[in-house]
Image: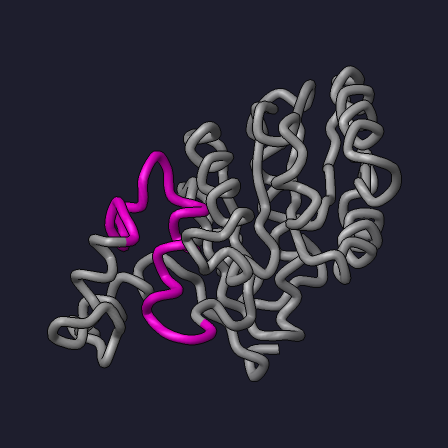
Amino acid sequence: MDGLWSHQRDAIQWSDDRTAVLLHHEMGCGKTRTAIEILKRRMARGDRGGFAVLVACPKAVIAAWVKQCGLWWPDVRVVALTKGTSAQKAKQVEAALADRTPVVFVVNYETAWRMPILEKTPWSAIVWDEVHRLKSPSGAASRWAARVCKKNAESPKIGLSGTMIPHSLMDCYGIWRAVESPECPTFGQSAFLHRTKYCVIAPGQNFVIGYKNLDDAHRRVAATTHRAVAADV
């Protein structure tokens, strides 16, 4: 782990015994490299044969993942699912999985939830980059991520974000649900329970006018995320 900053080393150690890993690291803190080092450690613990990682991310950062894996994890194959129809991409996944050497698939969220093979495949590890994109529990990508998480309960799920909770406590359930299996113990087993516990609802209405139990929410966030800021670099 040469060349790592101290906050990266700390995050790697912090993640060691967790299946749900949320790294709230600001831009410039090297969270992609940190995630790669976590994945390398997990692979080193077990059988390299069949070690398959799913990385879902915004389309704009697919190239960065390919580059970073080439720099810091050159002994794994990297398959970017960026070209062709969904059927062609599915065949690409099947062919890559048939070769039992370690492989990382990188795909954008909008493509990922439309590919049944990605939901059916048992993953050795999963990365949700810019995990706050999954904040809406009713969104197609968020619901898909929750299903993938549940089907891979024993595998590490790593969520990365520089803005973990971009708007309000309402964001938390969808984000935490994407990494916590089989349900979401940190913020409740349903979006309704989460809303009931932390939101003040207008009498006779169905919209949020405030928040409650904030100390409890802050403790839960602190206990389940690793924080790094630009000043740590």
Relative height, residue 62 to residue 213 (above, below): above
Residue 156 located left or right of residue 117: left
Residue 86 located left or right of residue 169: right
Q: Which residues are magenta?
A: 166-191
Relative height, residue 83 to residue 102 (above, below): below
- Quarter occupied by residue 3: bottom right
The image shows residue 124 at horizontal and vertical percentages of 58, 29
Q: Is residue 41 magenta?
A: no
Relative height, residue 37 to residue 153 (above, below): below
Query: What residue appears at the point 45 percent right and 58 percent down from the top-left corner?
Result: 136
Query: What residue appears at the point 43 percent right and 40 percent down from the top-left corner?
Result: 19
Query: What residue appears at the point 47 percent right and 73 percent down from the top-left corner?
Result: 166
The image shows residue 216 at horizontal and vertical percentages of 18, 67
Quadrant of the image containing the C terminus: bottom right
| Residue closer to the observer: 14 or 85 | 85
| Residue closer to the observer: 152 or 37 | 152
Q: Is residue 169 magenta?
A: yes
In the picture as drawn, the residue positioned furthest to the left comes out as 203
| Residue closer to the observer: 216 or 117 | 117
How many numbered tags mark residues here?
Answer: 0
In the picture as drawn, the residue positioned furthest to the right comes out as 84
- Quarter occupied by residue 123: top right
Magenta stretch mostly in which secondary structure?
Answer: loop
In the picture as drawn, the residue positioned furthest to the front comes out as 204
Query: What residue appears at the point 43 percent right and 51 percent down from the top-left corner?
Result: 138
Is residue 40 visible to us here?
Answer: no
The image shows residue 21 at horizontal and vertical percentages of 46, 50
In the picture as drawn, the residue positioned furthest to the bottom comes out as 231
